[in-house]
Image (spheres, grey):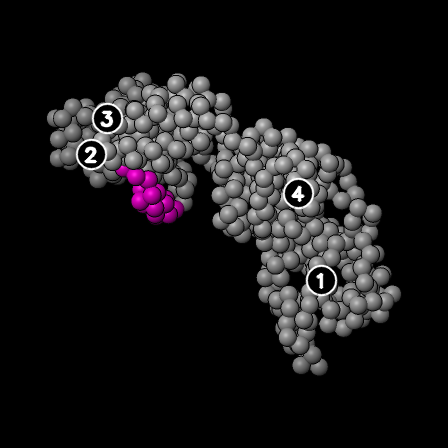
Amino acid sequence: MDHFPVFMAVAGRRIVLSGGGDAALAKLRLILKTTAKVTVFAPQAAPELHAWAAAGRLTLVLRVMAAGDAQDAVLFYAANEDDAEDARVAALAHADGAKVNIVDNLGDSEFITPAIVDRDPVVVAIGTEGAAPVLARKIKADLEAQLPASLGLLARVGKTFRHAVNVLPMGVKRRDFWSAFYFREGPKAVSKGQDQIVPTLESLLDDHIMGQTKAGHVDLVGAGPGDPDLLTLKARKALDKADVVIHDRLVTGDILELARREAIIIDAGKEGFGKSMKQEDIDALIVDHARGGAHVVRLKAGDPTVFGRLDEEIDALVAADIPYTIVPGITAASAAVAGISQSLTKRGRNSAIRFITGHDTKGYADHDWKVLGQPGQVAAIYMGKRAARFIQGRLLMHGADPATPVTIIENVSRTNQRIIATTLAELEPTMSNANLTGPAITFYGLAPRDALAIDLQEQEAI
């Protein structure tokens, strides 16, 4: 992020613009939505500028800008549509201490003007750091269609009522009140007449003051393998409602960014063979927050039902009589197999797929190696980095073909995903030599489709 978004206070402060043509008009249509004192310098000005000046919306000075003209200005716009003149006036504004924007010159601008969705006092600013203005306009159009025209009116009335709502405790109860006002009772009141808004607020507040605090709820949510686009819609909705998010170490920062800004974010990471929070401590953490009335999201990488210690957390919730919902996610095997253009099952190859773990609470996990060693078997091995030599040895010991394809996928679905194709015979030292630093899943019995194609071409050439 090269530009940090802020909402600057401009009420009663100077904004100065140099220019009188189309570029100036485009900027002024937005600037004049503010309550700033706007001054425009232009030797020749479009008719709209003269009309705005006559209406008292801005001060128009019909000459080129000179030294000192941007004195005390909080913002300055160079919109002359002439590079040399824009550079000249920008230098003058800099000398006067103003922050400078040069229209269509991102590199020399100190700030950029975002696309705006205006439901005053609700304002949504959309920026692409100058990279994709068309995209910003599309997002603006989508938001304009979704936000009702009455939203600004409700927000203005609600702002005057905020002090009264402070009698409600912070968190769920206060948020439920405002949610009911803005999205249910408020719009109903507007449809009956603006004079109904305040009585509706008062009645709604009485109901929430007298109402009992809601019991807490826990969503056990699958965050998927890492790509935020693979998060389910139900998971997104859960994050949007969460008061507390308790996540494991494999949940990516991009996904945590989707949680409400006011939410408490707690890292309860667990790592095999390493330092980690005890499971019973995680259980207690979830229960304690839910008992306090919070909407808790227990966020687990992948799918919570696959090697996610889900049953232990459900048992703790049941024992505490706390309601819960399981929100499934895309497990790493599903995303990883898509990344190598394969399928988990295939007619004539395998009619079953095994999901196995490299280690469990007792150490390296044992499996039916004799069955796994038979031709055509396919297994997705989770948490198998440290157990690679153990798994390799057990399979070879039970008759598995050393040439069986093995594929290691690190950081599944993420931008830094890495795919390593090898064989059972070379699983170690391949795994160690790869210096894996991210989470990885290993496919036994599957090779990337492009690797199979190359192998086929080599065989045909012999």
Q: CA distance from mark 2 to mark 4?
A: 67 Å
Nearer to me, 32 or 96: 32
Circle number at residue 314: 4
Give the main secondary structure of the magenta stretch: helix
Which is more N-terminal, label 1 or label 2? 2
Q: CA distance from mark 1 to mark 3?
A: 65 Å
Whether residue 15 sits left or right of residue 112 in the image: it is left
Whether residue 250 sits left or right of residue 107 in the image: it is right
Range drawn in magenta: 132-149
Q: Residue at x 53, y 46 (%)?
A: 235
Nearer to me, 149 or 195: 195
Question: Residue 257 at what x, y percent from top left?
Answer: 53, 39
Circle number at residue 20: 2
Marks 4,1: beta carbons within 8 A: no
Q: CA distance from mark 4 to mark 3?
A: 49 Å
User: Magenta includes 353?
Assistant: no
Marks 2,4: beta carbons within 8 A: no
Q: Which residue is mark 3?
A: 195
Which type of secondary structure does the marked residue at label 3 adopt? helix
Q: Which residue is mark 1?
A: 354
The kind of residue tagged 1 is Arg
Would residue 398 be visible to someone looking at this image? Answer: yes
Q: CA distance from mark 3 to mark 2?
A: 43 Å
